Each structure stands twice: as C-alpha cells, then as structure tokens.
Image (spheres, rainbow, N blue to C red):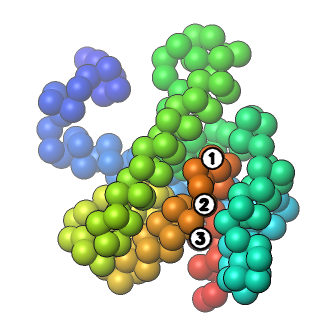
C-alpha cells in the first residue's frame, strides 16, 4: 500500500529488490545514453577527454593540476542545471527527495547538493581502493558493485578491472578531484571506449 521509497529495504522481498535494481539500472543506463548523445556531450567534455587521454601532454608538464584547471574553467559544477543536471543525477542514481517535489525552485540546489555528497563518497572509496592495492585484489561481486556505482554494467571480470583501474587512476591523480570532472567521468570513459572499438 506504500511506495517502496517510503519503506526500508527490510519490507521488500528478494524478488522485489531484484526487480527494483533492474529498473534502476535501466534508468541509469538510459540517462547515460542520453548524455552521450551529440547534444549532451559538450565541447567542454571533449576538451577534458582529450586532456585525460593524452599522457604525453601530462608527462610534458600538463599534469593533474592542468586538467583540474580545465575542468574548473571549462565547466563549473555550480552552473550544471536543467535537463543536463537531471540526466547527470539520473545516471548516478541520485534523487532529489520529497521536499524539492513540493518546492520545485529548490530542486536544482537539492539535486546538486545530493550529487556532491554522493561524489564525495565515490572519491573516498576510490582512495581506499588505491590504498588497498587496486581492483585486481577484489572479488568479482565487489567489482560488480563498485563498477555499478560508477555507472558501468558488465559481467566480464577483465573489463571491470580495467575500467575500475583507469577510473581510480584518474580520480586519485588530482588533488581533491574536481566535482565537475568526477560527475562526468562515466561519460569520458564510455566515450573513450566507444572510440577505441
């Protein structure tokens, strides 16, 4: 009789949890696909992708600080709004909550705040993965969970390891990885993967 979001997971059957998980994964994948379209993949992201995928430039003096500066100059996280913000949050599985639905003018700031909080959790987890020796030491179920949290759905262990290794390297390479960069990192990695196939 109650929406599932109003109940704790203790009230859900295993079948219902699986059903909701599949629906959430599909919704996140749809938002990712929308962002990877021509309109969603902006010129600022193309510049970031070029910087991240060019190790020679980083070794030649354009290190983490340069890419961090580009991510701040090319895209201010505070200016991410509208449908783009909705899609970014949808890709990460971040919801605005009940209050912004009642007060629509608060929705943008509420989504941005929740997304920033979620990204801090992701960055902290990235640092822990690096300290513990990288993704190669993780079991498959842990790999699946960590990759899903970072918007990758895969059953191939090698693909998940490579994805997570690259993710952690980029995320922890910069001092306090800029929110704008981390928020769009799934797009950068997926687009880079598309272009290499």
Question: Which mark is first along the chain, 3 or 2?
Answer: 2
Q: Image check: 67 left or right of 145?
A: right
Q: Quadrant of the N terminus?
A: top left
* Label 1 crowd bin: few (<14), some (14–19), many (20+), radius 10 Å: many
Q: Position of residue 132 (x, y in %)?
A: 29, 66
> Would you name the residue on which mark 1 appears?
179
Which residue sits at x=24%, y=70%?
138
Question: Which mark is first along the chain, 2 or 1?
Answer: 2
Observer-side mark, 2 or 3, equals 2
Which residue sits at x=77%, y=50%?
72
Which residue sits at x=16%, y=28%?
11
* Label 2 crowd bin: few (<14), some (14–19), many (20+), radius 10 Å: some
Observer-side mark, 1 or 2, equals 2
Q: CA distance from mark 2 to mark 3?
A: 20 Å
Q: Quadrant of residue 174?
A: bottom right
Q: Position of residue 19 (x, y in %)?
A: 28, 47
Q: Image check: 61 left or right of 110?
A: right
Q: CA distance from mark 1 to mark 2?
A: 11 Å
Q: Image check: 75 left or right of 6?
A: right
Q: Position of residue 37 (x, y in %)?
A: 73, 62
Q: Image check: 81 left or right of 125?
A: right
Q: How many marks?
A: 3
Compared to residue 157, the image places residue 100 above or below, namely: above
> Would you name the residue on which mark 2 appears?
174
Q: Secondary structure at mark 2?
A: loop
Which residue sits at x=67%, y=66%?
64
Per the rendering, the mark at residue 190 is 3
């Amino acid at each position: 009789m109650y929406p599932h979001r109003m109940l704790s997971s203790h009230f859900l059957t295993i079948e219902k949890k699986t059903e909701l998980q599949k629906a959430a994964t599909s919704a996140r994948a749809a938002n990712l696909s929308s962002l990877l379209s021509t309109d969603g993949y902006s010129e600022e992201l193309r510049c970031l992708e070029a910087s991240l995928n060019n190790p020679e430039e980083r070794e030649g003096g354009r290190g983490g600080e340069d890419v961090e500066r580009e991510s701040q100059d090319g895209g201010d996280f505070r200016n991410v709004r509208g449908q783009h913000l909705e899609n970014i949050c949808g890709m990460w599985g971040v919801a605005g909550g009940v209050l912004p639905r009642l007060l629509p003018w608060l929705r943008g700031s509420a989504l941005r705040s929740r997304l920033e909080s979620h990204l801090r959790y992701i960055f902290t987890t990235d640092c822990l993965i690096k300290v513990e020796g990288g993704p190669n030491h993780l079991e498959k179920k842990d790999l699946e969970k960590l990759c899903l949290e970072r918007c990758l759905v895969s059953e191939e262990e090698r693909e998940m390891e490579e994805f997570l290794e690259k993710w952690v390297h980029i995320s922890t390479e910069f001092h306090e990885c800029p929110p704008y960069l981390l928020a769009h990192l799934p797009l950068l990695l997926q687009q880079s993967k598309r272009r290499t196939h």
